[in-house]
Amino acid sequence: MDSRSSEILHEFPPFFKVYKDGRIEKLWSLHFAPPSDDPETGVRSKDVVILPECGVSARIFIPKINGPDQKFPILLHIHGGGFCAGSPFEIICQNFLNSLTAEANIIVVSVDYRLAPEHHLPIAYDDSWDALQWIASHSTRSGPDPWLNEHGNFGRVFVAGESAGANIAHNVVIRAGVNPPPGLDIIGLILLSPFFGGAETDNMYKFLCPSSSGSGDDPKLNPAVDPNLPGLGCRKVFVCVAEKDGLRGRGWEYHETVKKSGWGGCIEIEEAEGEDHCFHMFNPSSSKLGPLLKKLSSFINHD
């Protein structure tokens, strides 16, 4: 046997290992759930292909419909997982988005962007941007998905993500400020346990995104150096951090950076005491989850 097949070149726990022969071993176990008609919440979900040319898909969630003319706010959800793991088809994602859809009475489109390192960054950012454009293609009521055509409120659109997905969500809304998607009014941005970089080099990010330095001079990692930050393409931002999360400080720093940027919107931040990273998915029995869902519902449904 070639000794290179077992020699580890890079190791980035808990996500993946890279062997000298080029093989990649993913360490993150995914537990998938099919789309469903959820009896607890009344939420229906289905899977759709949104970029046929590259196979990118999404899971759409819709709450109980009370009439043919009912319109719901639309939320583009971007999952976490270090840019290299996770899926909207994962059971923890399915459970949270069922709850959020029902609580906030919204349509959620959760994009299954292509994962690194098999697909180097910034492809996850591009796929997520294309998902927003796909949503916009329904604003004339003639897009490929009937749920969005018939029940989407394109004047009340939100972008949300957790962890690495929050980083992508922020950058999607930055891009929307530069190039607003036609037919959409992006009201707000929701960042849960957001991942942003520091001054030091993040070797995993640099490996996933060879075009990046992996350090604080990359605007995707450090919003403070992004000249487009004052034009963030939404009216308000909500950030949730967790007391025990190692990324807690980065979330607070993001909050202060946006406040001082000259952007004209409103930003608020809340900290979940006693909770850890992405508790809203990993700790569904948390006493903090119900209040968080109510907060998100209020943020989405009230100006």
Image: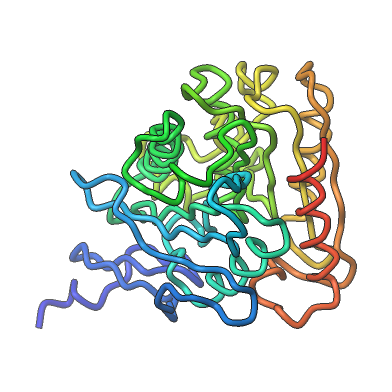
Residue 11, image x, y percentages: 42, 67
Taking the image as shown, residue 134 lies to the left or right of residue 229, namely left
At x 49%, y 18%, the residue is: 179
At x 79%, y 56%, the residue is: 241
Choose between 193 and 32: the one closer to the eye: 32
Choose between 62 and 88: the one closer to the eye: 62
Query: Against 286, is 240 above or below?
Result: above
Choose between 225 and 98: the one closer to the eye: 98
Q: Quadrant of residue 153?
A: top right
Residue 37, image x, y percentages: 49, 76
At x 46%, y 68%, the residue is: 15
Please give the count of numbered marks on the rendered protein.
0
In this view, the residue farthest toward the left is 1
Screen quadrant of the C terminus: top right
Q: Quadrant of residue 128?
A: top left
Query: Against 248, is 2 above or below?
Result: below
Choose between 129 and 257: the one closer to the eye: 129
Residue 26, image x, y percentages: 36, 72
Screen quadrant of the N terminus: bottom left
